[in-house]
Image (cartoon, helix red, strand yellow):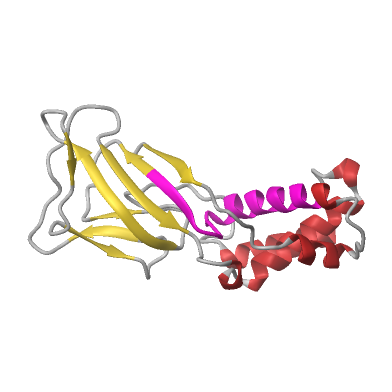
Amino acid sequence: MPYSINIDTAATSYPVTTAEAKAHCRVDVSDDDTLIDRLISVATTLAEVATDRTFISTTYTLKLSGWPAGDSVKLPRAPLQSVTSVTYYDVDDASQTLAGSVYDTDTASEPGLIFQKINQAWPDLSARKWPVEIVYIGGQTSAANVPDGIKQAMLLAIGHWYIHREQVGRMTYDVKFAWDTLIAAASYGGGNISYDPAEVSY
């Protein structure tokens, strides 16, 4: 199913702090703080893409081309904290809020999802490109809840990039093996993920 996902409110912190990264790199001065912060940002992005996760609270809008064939919609970028709203455009192309009596939220599953309640059905939709919009919050509430394996993978990458500044796109075999292993342990399939809100496949 075609879909579009946008960040409404980005995370305000990272899984790894500047102090943690500096300690890992054995840096005592502040001269390279800007560089290290940039490496933290890059490592976070790469790790989130590789695992299809969000690490720290981020608000998303997921736009769908229609309702799924089944009774649930899976929400990318686990873990799911909460669903803020579900809106849709009806057959008259008027914006409507989906009633809470129609659906429920599952934050325990990964990825999280919304699903029809018993004896309910998805309403008919407009013919516009993105008739369904779901606003939700993904990620952990604080860095303390991000798995240690993710943090360690990020620190390995940051340390490697800090030393090898002209080869930031490459890793030694040992570092890459450790990165791949730690990332695979936190991802859904341990590899490239093809995501469909109506059905997750690996």
- Which quadrant of the figure has residue 178? bottom right
Is residue 49 highlighted in magenta?
yes
The percent coordinates of residue 46 (x first, y second) are 65, 50
The percent coordinates of residue 132 (x first, y second) are 26, 40
Going by the picture, which residue comes out furthest to the front?
Answer: 30
* Left or right: 199 as drawn, with respect to 144: left
- Quarter of the image containing the N terminus? top left
* Left or right: 55 as drawn, with respect to 199: right
* Left or right: 156 as drawn, with respect to 147: right
Residue 18 in view here: yes
Q: What are the residue bounds of the magenta stretch?
A: 36-61
Is residue 51 highlighted in magenta?
yes
Camera-nearest residue between 149 and 187 = 149
- The image shows residue 24, relative to residue 70, as above or below, that is below
The percent coordinates of residue 29 (x first, y second) are 92, 59
- The image shows residue 4, relative to residue 24, as above or below, that is above
Main secondary structure found in the magenta portion: helix
Q: How many marks?
A: 0
* Left or right: 144 as drawn, with respect to 9: right
Q: Residue at x 21, y 40 (%)?
A: 88
- The image shows residue 51, relative to residue 9, as above or below, that is below
The percent coordinates of residue 120 (x first, y second) are 10, 57
Residue 172 in view here: no
Q: Residue at x 85, y 55 (%)?
A: 160
Q: Residue at x 53, y 48 (%)?
A: 10
- Which quadrant of the figure has residue 183? bottom right
